[in-house]
Structure formats: C-alpha cells, structure tokens
Image: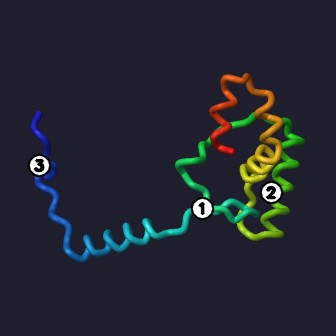
Amino acid sequence: MAKRPSLRREVPAASDESMRALDRLEGAASTAAAPRAAGGGDTLKRDTHAPTTLNLDKDLVELLRLIATGRAKEHGGRPSVSAVVEDILERHRSELLAELPPRYRRIFAADE
C-alpha cells in the first residue's frame, strides 16, 4: 500500500529564526538553577540521588509532611519529605552502619 502524497513530502527545513529560538531555549535550560532541597538549601545532584518508594504508616507520613511544611515556611522553598528523611538518616548514619554486616560497611565507610 502506497503512502498518501502528503506523507511522502519532505519536511521543510527549519528557518533561521526558529533555530535561533531553539538555541536560546537550550541555553536557558542548561543555565537554569538546579532544584533545591527545602530547608537546607543544598543543590540536589541528579547523579547522587535516586528515587525510591517507602511504605510507611499514615501517621508517620503525616508527621514527615508537617515537618517538611514547617521547614519550608521557616527557611523558604518547597516542602520536601525527602529532605526530612535524608536528614534523619544522616543524623543516625553511624547507628545504621553498625547494623550492616561487616562486608558491606566498607562500601559506606568511604562516604564518611
């Protein structure tokens, strides 16, 4: 089955003006500020953070949300439950490392 004549035509080349607009957009995107963690103001690095899902009691989730909202109001920025959890984990890092089997501790020892 042959394609319709309208599908066989070549796409016209982009105009100089549209290419300049695209260059401006790409330049703006590359210089845009990275997202910031609420409260701490630290720039999040995409190569050091990974998304995850946690199943927690609703009461704990609500507590984390309230803390994140309070931090955002106090320090500015958006509420970030992830930042709250990260702070708690960093605060208790040594206790968590003590629970690891010895063969895994050396992996995280370099991070300290």
Rounded to the nearest whole Å, what is the CA distance between mark 2 and mark 3?
55 Å
Instruction: Mark 2 and mark 3 in contact? Answer it, CB < 8 Å.
Output: no
Residue type marked 3: Arg
Q: Which residue is mark 3?
A: 8
Residue 61 appears left or right of 51: right
Which residue bears the numbered disc 2?
Answer: 68
Query: Looking at the image, do the residues carrying marks 2 and 1 touch, with CB atoms under 8 Å apart?
Result: no
Q: Which badge, 2 or 3, is on the more N-terminal residue?
A: 3
Q: Nearer the viewer, mark 2 or mark 3?
A: 2
Residue 62 at x, y = what percent?
A: 86, 47
- Mark 1 residue type: Pro
Left or right of 6: which side holds 81? right
Residue type marked 2: Ala
User: What residue is shown with label 1?
Assistant: 35
Q: Secondary structure at mark 3?
A: helix
Nearer to us: label 1 or label 3? 1
The numbered mark, 1 or 3, whose residue comes first in the sequence reads: 3
Q: Residues within 10 Å of mark 2 (few under 14, many from 20)?
A: many
Task: Please tell me in which quadrant of the rendered image residue 16 appears.
Answer: bottom left
Instruction: Give the CA distance from mark 2 to mark 1.
Output: 16 Å
Question: Which quadrant of the figure contains the C terminus?
Answer: top right
The N terminus - image quarter: top left
